[in-house]
Amino acid sequence: MESVKTVLITQARTGSTRLPGKVLLKVQGQELLKIHLDRLQQCKLIDQIIVATTISAEDDAIAQLCVSWGIDFSRGMVDDVLDRFYTSTKNIRPDWIVRVTSDCPLIDPRLVDAVVAFAQTNNVDYASNVLLEHFPDGQDVEVMKFSALEKAWKESVLKSDREHVTPFIRNNSSFKGGMLFLSMNFPCVADYSAVRMTVDEAKDFDLIERIVSDLGVDQSWMTYTNYIIDNQLDKINSNIIRNEGMIKSLKND
């Protein structure tokens, strides 16, 4: 049997402070997590998808849904998400790890494949479309060699590095002048960073409800983006700060 080469991990939990249980909120009868996973299963370059949730009892619901949907999952520490990622794949030891987050229900599988191909073609330790944040929030894709994830797991000590998985890699990447990880940014055709398709707060969910109602769940990131801009729907959640959770974590280091 051919070994797994590229594993996508999406982190999911119900304990969000700003919008508790957000990944289990439903749009047109489907959980945001289900929409997210259904889109990811359309990826052509992913060999396996794993939902990395927590050992918290409140996340039993996520584990049970993964069982019912036939999705692989792993469970680990609540705050050490880097450890969750590593322990979920340490026995598989794939060549590549893809990181996305489950609060991005409309992540584009074609974009995921494009970033994966970009990373593998250039044979870098880390590639993403977030080194320069020009894609809409909610279309974030990070691809790294398993060796890079393992090194980060072994050497990261800051709480923010472990809670957010990849800061240690990004901060020590060649893109930022570091020496540990050869890295490249996947470019965007324009700066769409003001558009939010992630779900952190109730206003974000309102926007997702609107565009799913109007366009369904099978459109490209560009189609959703243009629709949001053309109909000025970005005003619904434009006051929310991008990466607010990361900013809070850095203050607590």
Image: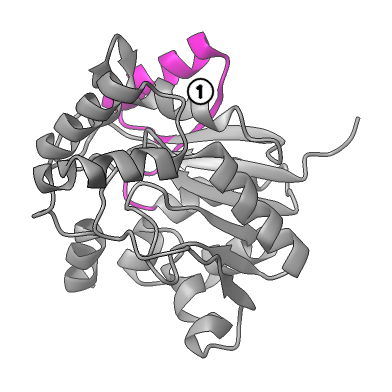
Could you say which is closer to the camera, residue 120 or residue 12? Answer: 120
Question: As drawn, is 195 to the left or to the right of 178?
Answer: left
Question: As drawn, is 1 to the left or to the right of 4?
Answer: right
Could you say which is closer to the camera, residue 206 or residue 224? Answer: 224
Q: Residue at x 52, y 67 (%)?
A: 187
Does residue 57 appear in the picture of this structure?
A: no
Q: Quadrant of the N terminus?
A: top right
Q: Residue at x 48, y 62 (%)?
A: 129
Q: Quadrant of the C terminus?
A: bottom left
Picture quadrant of residue 190: bottom left
Identify the secondary structure beneath mark 1: helix
Picture quadrant of residue 47: top right
Highlighted magenta segment, given as a residue range: 53-80
Does residue 207 appear in the picture of this structure?
A: yes
User: Residue 31: percent from the left, percent from the top?
Assistant: 33, 18
Q: Is residue 102 magenta?
A: no
